[in-house]
Amino acid sequence: MHGPPLAGLLLTALCAGVAGLCLLRMRAVAAEERRGAAGDALMGLGMAAMALPAGLPGPAAWTAGAFAVVFGAAFVRAVLPLRAAGHHLHHAIGALAMVYMAVAMGAADHGGHGAAAGLPAVTAALLAYYVLYVLYGGLRPVAAGAGGPRGPAGAWAGGGWAVRPELAGACRVCMGVGMVAMLLAL
């Protein structure tokens, strides 16, 4: 990521932590929710790798193309169910945003300018989407009484904490904040 190294490291830690929670959530939720949890985990891992500060061991220059391919495939996978059920629009937008940032960062790294490039109108549109998404997600009331068994034994045995709907929402809001930070650094 282009920007202050400390911000990149903190963003990497946040996104990697969120990805880990999404992987745990993926194991605990019902089959119909696993696809969303898997998409969130992929997005978190990709964002963590992309947010690594320049100069640290991490993604090489060729990885911009790999990110574009992986998230292009994630976009196609998110769009296919849209025709049938209208789900996963947020994942499709997120995948396109990741492709856009990978291409912009790859172009900047290849051009040797040391700063990322991008189309200001596209960056502004993505920023507007993610700011609104984070505000909406952060202000949305949390479902009262949702979740599985409580207590020390039930929380781990039944996956109670991992299936709570507010965990999924919190993960998506955290990744939305991360996306805003990455787009600002673009």
Image: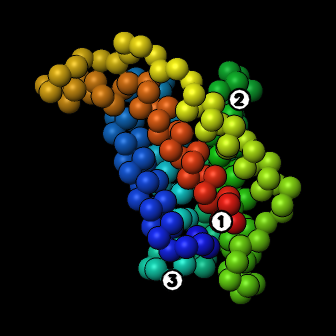
Q: Earlier in the sequence, mark 2 or mark 3?
A: 3
Marks 2/1 in contact by CB < 8 Å: the verdict is: no
Q: Secondary structure at mark 1?
A: helix
Nearest the viewer among 8 and 158 is 8
Nearest the viewer among 34 and 146 is 146
Q: Is residue 71 above or below residue 62?
A: above
Marks 2/3 in contact by CB < 8 Å: the verdict is: no
Q: CA distance from mark 2 to mark 1?
A: 31 Å
Q: Quadrant of the N terminus?
A: bottom right
Find residue 129 and name its label: none
Nearest the viewer among 181 and 66 is 181
Q: Quadrant of the C terminus?
A: bottom right
The amino acid type found where label 2 is placed reads Leu
Find residue 55 and name its label: 3
Q: Which residue is under mark 2?
A: 82
Q: Earlier in the sequence, mark 1 or mark 3?
A: 3
| Colouring used for the render | rainbow
Q: Is residue 136 above or below residue 104?
A: above
**Residue, far left:** 153
**Residue, far bottom:** 112
